[in-house]
Amino acid sequence: MAQDADIRISSALISRDELITKIQQGEYLVIAADETVLSGLPSGNWIAGTIPYFMTRAGGKVDRNSIFVNTIHGIAPNRAPRITLYDANSISRIAQEAPEHGFTIVILPAMSQVHLSYAQKAPEYPNMYFSPIVGWISGVHLDDLGSRNAKVGFGPANGMLFDQQAVAMHIPMPEYQLATINIVNLFTQGDGPEIKFPNTGFKAEECTINGTPGNLADYIKQENIDTRLPLVANYSGVMINVSIQQVDALHHRVDLYAPVFADVGYRFAKPVPNYIESFNQALPSSVSEDIAFTCNCILNFLYSELEGKNTRDLTGPITFGEVAYQLLNQTMVYLTLNSAR
């Protein structure tokens, strides 16, 4: 009997013609590109998210015409990946529908209801943490914030694009392979006051600061807070970042890349002495051939000035949020596939 092949994931920046050929050949693909590139792709075994920012082997890149593709190799006829579309209600099934032995790659559109639902409830989904779930939040060029919506692409349905649904690829593996999720996070809670919010959402206004009523935008201005530092919540020792998108001082409002949750205690992160140096030091010391999938936050890209610089051959989309089981912000996430054979 022939042995199962290892599941592998290769990545590359390719042309649209090359992508269409791969789709027509029936390959299983995870695609990152601007909406203009994703529109009109043929149907096939693929999922996609809108983003024009990439980490390539040549360095960080901003390009509305580039296409970053992860190709899944080693697929056996009896364990083909399953591609699924989820909305804000059905996303709770994602862990239950994950393969018994394998992993899931999910893409959710930024600022959508499914993004909010996943951010708020994912740790409580049935079977969560039984099978690795990794992925990213799709976005837009920063110049287009407020004028275009992030979208995902669902290959099986004529390559349709959606701004209120998530897509996932559930990928079974041979029993002898193991998928592991790794997170690079520079931040812990600082020593400043505890901040709580009355409402859950991607916009923060009124809050309490050490129990005293206040406004987050006003507090940031008064205290001259470095908004490169995220708000951090401590969930039983797990640090979850909520990154600042912009401070609207005129309307006394802060726009966020991830939602804050009502009645959860946040503190601004401890300052990072040298963001670029700290990020580089936090990367794995050597890039293993077992690293199969990587995504990195848009804020790491901006604050570490990664355009034109590489991250030790760790390549992938630059995103509006990362998924390592639950939603993360201002992190880098990577997946390793190890074989015991």
Image (spheres, rainbow, N blue to C red):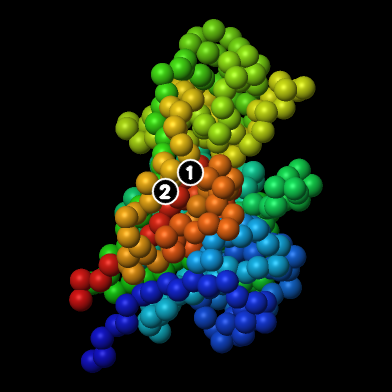
- Point out which mark residue 276 bears: 1
Which residue, as the protein is rendered here, is positioned at the far top?
212
Residue 238 makes an appearance in the image: yes
Q: Residue at x 62, y 69 (%)?
A: 67
Q: Give the numbered dot on residue 148.
A: none
Task: Identify which residue is drawn at 43% across, 27% down.
Answer: 270
220 vs 35: above or below: above
The image quadrant where one finds the N terminus is bottom left
Give residue 4's position: percent from left, percent from top: 29, 83
**Would you place residue 286 above or below residue 327 in this image?**
below
Q: Is residue 241 left or right of residue 86?
A: left
Q: Residue at x 32, y 31 (%)?
A: 236
Between the residue at mark 2 and the residue at mark 1, the CA separation in whole angstroms equals 6 Å
Q: Work out which quarter of the rendered image holds the C terminus and state it.
A: bottom left
Q: Residues within 10 Å of mark 2 (few under 14, many from 20)?
A: some
Residue 140 screen position, x and y as percent: 68, 52
Circles 2 and 1, Cβ within 8 Å, touching? The answer is: yes
Check disc 1: other Cα within 10 Å, few if <14, some if 14-19, many if 20+: some
Q: Amino acid at mark 2?
A: Asn
Q: Residue at x 37, y 46 (%)?
A: 281
Identify residue for label 2: 280
